[in-house]
Amino acid sequence: QAEGILWNDANAKQLSTSVAGARHGLVGVIWIGTGNVSVGNSTTETSMIGGGFGRKVFPANYFSVGKGIRITLHGQYSSDGTTPDIATMRVKLDNTTILSGAFSVAPQTGVSSKDWSLNANLFCIATGGSGSFGGGGMITYEDFSGNSIAGAVGLTTATATTFSTTGTATVNVTAQYTGAAAGDLTRCIYSTI
């Protein structure tokens, strides 16, 4: 396409333009989550994406090879000070886990409202009924003093995960504790897709 021209790229299923000889897709945020969601004192897997504006559901046949989704969540965690627990976070399309990672909520008395962030990228690798996705990401979380990052945990998948692109696809991120402790709490405040 000619430099500076805007066109509907039927293969990538998006608006595109050409800048300095390179094709650039025009994409943006399709979901802004503003509803607080908390999981704590439970071992039940719980969605961390609450109410908000936009859409979390992609239509059937939306994905093409190379098309990606960027997911960002920000929240806070607290610890009961007695029991170390592991919070596992899973990035999903419908009920299929594409990425997962776990961070330890270490026992520390009086730890509350410490920040964490999840940044994930999912990419369509193959389309159709036997389509597949891969990707990667990171969970970072604040230390007990509140001054620095205590840790970073990779969100990984060893191989591409099979997921049919012929039906709709709902983006979700869940959290689940290994144990139920009264003072352990992970709360999602904001999310974007």
Image (cartoon, rainbow, N blue to C red):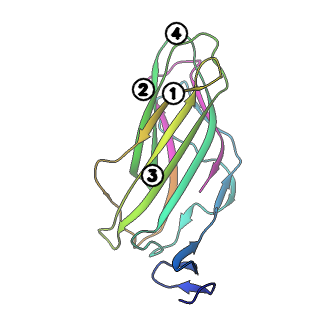
> Magenta residues?
173-193
| Residue 130, above or below 74 | below
190 within the magenta span: yes
Amino acid found under the numbered disc labelled 3 = Lys
**Which mark is drawn over residue 178?**
2
Verify CB contact (< 8 Å) between mark 3 and mark 1. no
Amino acid found under the numbered disc labelled 2 = Thr
Amino acid found under the numbered disc labelled 4 = Thr
Q: CA distance from mark 4 to mark 3?
A: 31 Å
Verify CB contact (< 8 Å) between mark 4 and mark 2. no
Question: Can you identify the residue that label 3 sits on?
Answer: 92
Q: CA distance from mark 4 to mark 2?
A: 14 Å
Of 16 and 61, which appears nearest the observer? 16
Q: Main secondary structure of the magenta part?
A: strand
Verify CB contact (< 8 Å) between mark 4 and mark 3. no
Q: CA distance from mark 4 to mark 1?
A: 16 Å
Question: For the residues carrying marks 1 and 2, which lies nearer the camera in this image?
Answer: 2
| Residue 138, above or below 59 | above
Q: Position of residue 11 (x, y in %)?
A: 45, 82
Q: Residue furthest bottom?
A: 2
Q: Residues within 10 Å of mark 1 (few under 14, many from 20)?
A: some
Q: Position of residue 105 (x, y in %)?
A: 50, 22
User: Mark 4 vs mark 2: which is more N-terminal?
Assistant: 4
Question: Can you identify the residue that label 4 sits on?
Answer: 82
User: Mark 3 vs mark 2: which is more N-terminal?
Assistant: 3
- Seen at 63% across and 48% down, the residue is 191
Q: Residue furthest front?
A: 20
Q: Residues within 10 Å of mark 4 (few under 14, many from 20)?
A: some
Q: Circle 4 sits in a helix, a strand or a loop, which is it?
A: loop
Question: Can you identify the residue that label 1 sits on?
Answer: 42
